[in-house]
Each structure stands twice: as C-alpha cells, then as structure tokens.
Image: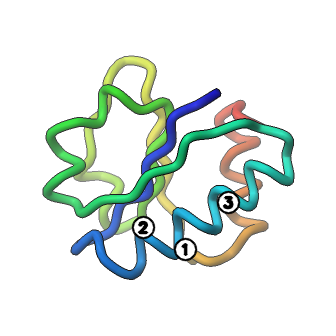
Amino acid sequence: MIKVLAVCGSGMGTSMIMKLKVGKVLQKLGIQADVNSCSLGEAKSGLANYDLVIASTHIAPELKGGPNTKIVGLLNLLDEKELEGKLKEIGIA
C-alpha cells in the first residue's frame, strides 16, 4: 500500500476533491493507497512520510519530499487521464 498526499493552497476544497479523484484513479489501476489531503503549509513539514504527493504545477516546485517521495504537478487537477499519465511516467502505474 502506498501513502499519497493531495496538496492545495488552503487544504480545504481542492485538495479534498483531488483526494477523491486520486483514490478513484488508483483503485481503477489496482493500486492500494492511503490517500490524505492538506494545505501547502502543512505539507512542507511532513512529506517524507509519503510515497506520492500530488499538487498543481504552481505548488509542486515548492514541495520537497524524502528520497523516495515522488512529487507530481498537474495542470488540471480534475483530469483523470492526466493523472494516469503522470503515474505511468513515474512508475507507479
């Protein structure tokens, strides 16, 4: 099981929607995951505990994870095909 974090600026609406989308896509791909969401400020202090972090392309460059943390920036946070493509690029799907 992989640990996934969806990050947005405030940690309220967008990251919650991303959490649901990411969970749906990973389930469709047969990948078991524990998906959480938070704000950018919260994310900056605890990314090393996650295997995968998903955020917008504007926020992703500000995030620094552990040596095994993969950080993915999406242009369209609700586009399941874009997410699937990025997961394949980084070897998760």
- Quarter of the image with the C terminus is top right
Q: Position of residue 76 (x, y in %)?
A: 57, 77
* Residue 83 numbered mark, or none: 3
Q: Is residue 27 left or right of residue 72?
A: right
Q: Is residue 64 left or right of residue 34?
A: left
In the displayed orientation, state which residue is furthest to the bottom: 13
- Quarter of the image with the N terminus is top right
For label 3, the crowd category at 10 Å Cα-Cα, with few meaning under 14, some 14 to 19 and many 20 or more, is many
Which is nearer the N-term, disc 2 or disc 1?
2
**Local SS, label 3:** helix
Which is nearer the N-term, disc 3 or disc 1?
1
Residue denoted by label 1: 77
Q: Nearer the viewer, residue 82 or 51?
A: 51
Mark 2 and mark 1 in contact? Answer it, CB < 8 Å: yes
Residue denoted by label 2: 56
Rendered image quadrant of residue 30: top right
- Indicate the amino acid at tag 1: Leu
- State the residue at coordinates (44%, 57%): 6
- Indicate the amino acid at tag 2: Ser
- For the residues labelled 3 and 2, the Cα–Cα distance comes to 11 Å
